[in-house]
Image: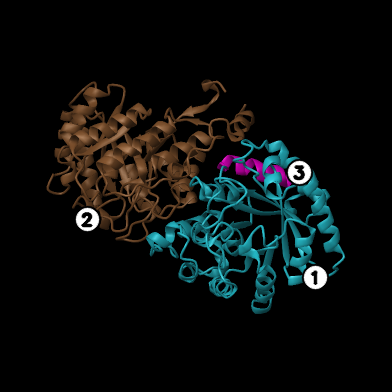
Chain colours: A brown, B cyan
Amino acid sequence: MAPDAKRPVLAIREVGPRDGLQMAKAIMPTAAKLLWIDAMVAAGVRDMEVASFVPPAALPQMADAADVTAAVRRQHPALKVVALAPNLRGAQNAAAAGAQVIIVPVSASEAHSRSNVRRSREEQVAEVARITAFAATLGAGRPRIEAGISTAFGCSLQGIVPEADVLRLAAALATAGADTVSLADTLGYASPSQVKRLVRGVRREVGAARFGHLHLHDTLGTALANVYAGLEEGVGGFDGALGGLGGCPFAPGSVGNAATEDLVYLLELEGFDTGIDLAALIAARAVLAEALPSERLHGRVAAAGIPRTYRLSSTVHEALEAVQ
Amino acid sequence: MAPDAKRPVLAIREVGPRDGLQMAKAIMPTAAKLLWIDAMVAAGVRDMEVASFVPPAALPQMADAADVTAAVRRQHPALKVVALAPNLRGAQNAAAAGAQVIIVPVSASEAHSRSNVRRSREEQVAEVARITAFAATLGAGRPRIEAGISTAFGCSLQGIVPEADVLRLAAALATAGADTVSLADTLGYASPSQVKRLVRGVRREVGAARFGHLHLHDTLGTALANVYAGLEEGVGGFDGALGGLGGCPFAPGSVGNAATEDLVYLLELEGFDTGIDLAALIAARAVLAEALPSERLHGRVAAAGIPRTYRLSSTVHEALEAVQ
């Protein structure tokens, strides 16, 4: 099958070095982070969230955020380098270190907002406006500002998060100047039809071109079902963390992200081009495991092995016939 | 929310006592099997595959198939009692023991057919015709004969299984008199769009009313995504095994079924009525674990705990609003 016969390229964002590490029991040294990032870039990852610009006292794992970001920018010119910043100060530091995309988390749950960024949702929208105003002063080559709506599908602190709240927040973030708006299922509570409704709703509020990524956690085993629901809505960007690491320290019960290996497997099986070599990505788990023995890695494809039908599956062939 | 506001009742078939046990390293005593089955029935399971009528030499775990089937029929009059039989002799024994549904496995992969039932696919279709002829002699109250197309989505022995082979086989099985035809992803190779295509195709061949269950394995983490694809096609019956046990001894690499707990969670989250009390079902894992300490139980919901938003999620409410 010629590569150009495949379905469109999808943006897989590896968030392991940020979200994946923020619950880790041990600090990963900067050099080890860079080796791990190298291995994932070698596997074909082209979009990666590498650090979080938060006060080191709040998250010692991210004390080297500026060093990591700057080193990755230097060493991997073709990689889209993404960093998280919860406030203007963090965004300024991320921009100075060379981040090309800055994700600003905004909770849909008022309770999580106060726990995670110690501000109300409204105050955090105002912070996004300050950050986009700052970014505009940087002119051409400025970082893109992506507002990431966390707890968009439910919250362990607040419980149910009304979908109307998410839509209002998305509209407010667009007004505040966010380049894109993403949806994050911080707790892993989303259902596939909820994903579809919220993707449609947010696109209606902010415009389809400004919809960013789906960031899904696999707490309850539903991440790939939710990815598939997103695919059916035409979502083009998905987050994952190698080995399914991750979770939010300020949202009790939040555990691993969708494992990037399993995400790539599903998307390629569905005929999409992720640009990622699955075997090489799985090999990068060894680099991570050696540097971070405190964490148990998840992921079904790594455990079972890549089926020999992976590249030539009837799925891909017949799906292509169906769309042609 | 009133119970009658929910989406239609779905048939969840628990296959743990059959598929779940056939790869187990230890023999589960008959009394332990019955206690485990009791616990699952108490949780609301109304359809269960309780045994496999194969020669005891081939599968010592199933040497008590007749005893288990007869005891379950006596003790649980409201349960639909299902058994597997690979040939006429097995079907006769299953019927004598009181099985109300007899599943006859027919491989879509020629290689798996020879490994699993030591017959070609064509010979196995002829065996199904003999079984349906036998069943017809039993008159009213006869067992229903369900042909289960195994390796329908790919095979570790043969590799790719052409979808056209599956459709031809489904048509032949309908002609052979099978009451229903089910699709089994023995290896866990299915992708969601492949599920949709094959469900549509098989329904075209056999008629929508004769489509049986989707039987999905979670080898590569895709089971729930494939369940969702089946739901979107209107499939009304899904198999699962408590704790995600299972696999086929004659298909290398075949591991666990979709975990019933996770399946119930997803379906209820999508607003369907499974009739199963999720907390009680999770409690039944302890009965299984005590009787079968050799097996590691899987399942994400049991590991994470049922979210407190489970029963009152915005998903259910807003999905219902959308369809009303």
* Image mark for residue A210: none
| CA distance separating discs 1 and 2 | 61 Å
The residue located at (54%, 59%) in the rendering is B24
Q: Is residue B323 visible?
A: yes
Q: Residues within 10 Å of mark 3 (few under 14, many from 20)?
A: many
Q: Going by the image, does A203 lie left or right of B52?
A: left
Q: CA distance from mark 1 to mark 3?
A: 31 Å
Q: Nearer the viewer, mark 1 or mark 2?
A: 1
Badge 2 crowding class, 10 Å Cα cut-off, few under 14, some 14 to 19, many 20 or more, is some
Q: Chain of mark 3?
A: B
User: Is A133 on the left or on the right of B84, as rendered?
Assistant: left
Q: Along the line of sight, which residue is nearer the eye, B200 or B41? A: B41
For mark 2, name the chain.
A
Q: Residue B120, labelled with which disc?
A: 3
* Left or right placement of residue B148 versus residue B10 in this view: right
* Image position, residue B26 (x, y; %): 53, 63
Range of magenta residues: B190-204
Percent from the top left, x then y, of residue A232? 52, 40
Amino acid, disc 2? Ser
Farthest bottom residue in view: B75
Tell me whether marks 1 and 3 sit on the same chain: yes
Q: Say which residue label 1 marks.
A: B141
Between B242 and B89, the one lying in front of the other is B89
Q: Amino acid at mark 1?
A: Gly
In space, the residues marked 3 and 2 are separated at their CA atoms by 63 Å
Judging by the rendered image, the residue that carries numbered circle 2 is: A115
Determine the residue positioned at 61% across, 62% down.
B18
Q: Numbered disc 1: what chain?
A: B
- The stretch drawn in magenta includes residue A68: no
- Please provide percent x and percent y for residue A224: 46, 45
